[in-house]
Amino acid sequence: MVREASVVTAERYAQGMTYDDYMSSINVNKARFEEYYANVQLDSDQSSSLRELASSEGGPARMMVIGEDWCGDVVRELPVLARVAEAAGIELRIFPRDENHDIMNEYLKEGLYMSIPVAVFYDQGHEYICHWIERSATAGREQGEIESTIRSEQPDISDQDFGRQRRARTAARAGDWQKATVDELVGLLQEHLH
């Protein structure tokens, strides 16, 4: 739940890393981040909607992202969030979750879980608009289906093999999930601005 007096003041927001700074600082999965970033393509309707939203009164001017380089959802979604910021012409700042628990605690999934990434949108005056957590509804549903399928096909699978198969099967869906993320973000912003 977002607190009335956020720890993310305009000054604190300005201390976050740009996407390039974040990429220079990460320790793991850099090649995967770069591959996803290179492959993320917003369609013309998505780009147009984002520019229109950003130019509307009270529209998004800033996005804050909370993430960690070891998290598969962050690896897949942070490049999408960077492309959304670019398409909308809004400023992006990134905060590592594990160094910023005070920020993370404002955006716990279901009020309990430190799920990442989190994308928080602010207007030009740094007023909170809305936020999005972890993955699209489509990705959440399909990931659950993938996990269930693996378990039903191989009830005795080791945790290590399960993780490998889950990564391979979810990677095959990444492009569609990223498109769903953009559509979800556009819808969320439209809902909160109109």
Image (spheres, grey):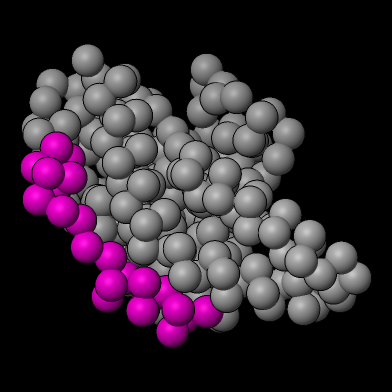
Q: Is residue 98 above or below residue 50?
A: below
**Magenta range:** 29-50
Type of secondary structure dominating the magenta stretch: helix
Q: Looking at the picture, tell me which residue is in the foreground, 28 or 105.
A: 28
Instruction: Specify the quadrant of the image occupied by residue 42.
Output: bottom left
Q: Which residue of the protein is positioned furthest toward the right in this rendering?
A: 156
Q: Which residue is at a point 70% across and 59% down the rendered structure image?
A: 149
How far across and how far down the image is residue 139, in percent? 50, 50
Q: Which residue is at a point 90% across and 70% down the rendered structure image?
A: 156
How far across and how far down the image is residue 68, in percent? 57, 63
Q: Is residue 103 left or right of residue 193?
A: right
Q: Is residue 129 left or right of residue 99?
A: left
Is residue 97 visible to us here?
no
How far across and how far down the image is residue 30, in percent? 46, 81
Please identify the quadrant where the N terminus is shown: top right
Q: Which residue is at a point 20% across and 28% down the rendered structure image?
A: 59
Q: Is residue 2 above or below residue 75?
A: above
Q: How many marks?
A: 0
Instruction: Specify the quadrant of the image occupied by residue 192.
Output: top left
Is residue 105 visible to us here?
yes
Q: Which residue of the protein is positioned furthest toward the bottom in this rendering?
A: 31
Q: Is residue 81 left or right of residue 142?
A: left
Q: Is residue 122 left or right of residue 149?
A: left
Q: Which residue of the protein is positioned furthest toward the front in this rendering?
A: 153
Please identify the quadrant where the C terminus is shown: top left
How far across and how far down the image is residue 36, in percent? 36, 72
Q: Looking at the picture, tell me which residue is in the foreground, 133 or 19.
A: 133
